[in-house]
Amino acid sequence: MSSFEEFLTKIEDEKNRFKLKSILDYIEKKFPNLEQVIKWNQPMFTDHQTFIIGFSVSKNHISVAPESKTINMFRDEIVNSGYTLSKEIFRIKWDQKINYGLLENIVKFNVMDKKEYKKFWR
């Protein structure tokens, strides 16, 4: 996970750093063909130079950005997991449990949905 290490070191709270690292590690293990990149100061996974999922951190949560089409596809699962959402992101509070199955399904959907896509964003 060398491309994400510098980003992770900037998260001061050790528990929060570990939580995001566990998400990034999980995606890396489940989807080893995805590229790890840092763009706009955010760790992201891409496939054939197309955005799949990105993350950012704030004082209170991790923002997960899978794009609005994917948010709409998984809206019920996101809400049922206890996460708040907006048009482009959903938020996992630092004290919330991570729904790894949801993250896996989101990444799987984006990889399949964008397999022929030629641009970075939808």
Image (spheres, helix red, strand yellow):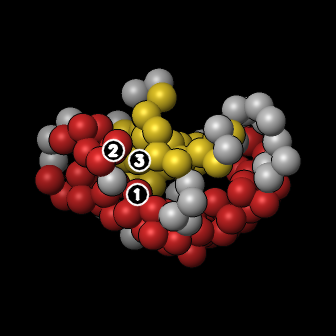
| Residue 89 picture location, percent across and down | 60, 42
Q: How many labels does the image show?
A: 3
* Residue 110 placement: quadrant: bottom right
Q: Distance between the residues labelled 2 and 1?
A: 8 Å
Decide: few, some or many residues near mark 1? Use Cα within 10 Å; few <14, some 14-19, many ≥20: some
Disc 2 designates what residue? 4
Disc 1 designates what residue? 24
* Residue 51 placement: quadrant: top right
Q: Is residue 79 left or right of residue 115?
A: left
Pointers 3 and 1 in contact (C-beta within 8 Å): no
Decide: few, some or many residues near mark 2? Use Cα within 10 Å; few <14, some 14-19, many ≥20: some
Disc 3 designates what residue? 62
For the residues carrying marks 3 and 1, which lies nearer the camera in this image? 1
Q: Distance between the residues labelled 3 and 1?
A: 12 Å
* Residue 11 placement: quadrant: top left
What residue lies at 55% left-to-right and 65% top-to-bottom?
A: 31
SS at mark 2 in the image: helix
Q: What amino acid does circle 1 point to? A: Leu
Pointers 2 and 1 in contact (C-beta within 8 Å): yes
SS at mark 1 in the image: helix
What residue lies at 79% left-to-right and 52% top-to-bottom?
A: 115
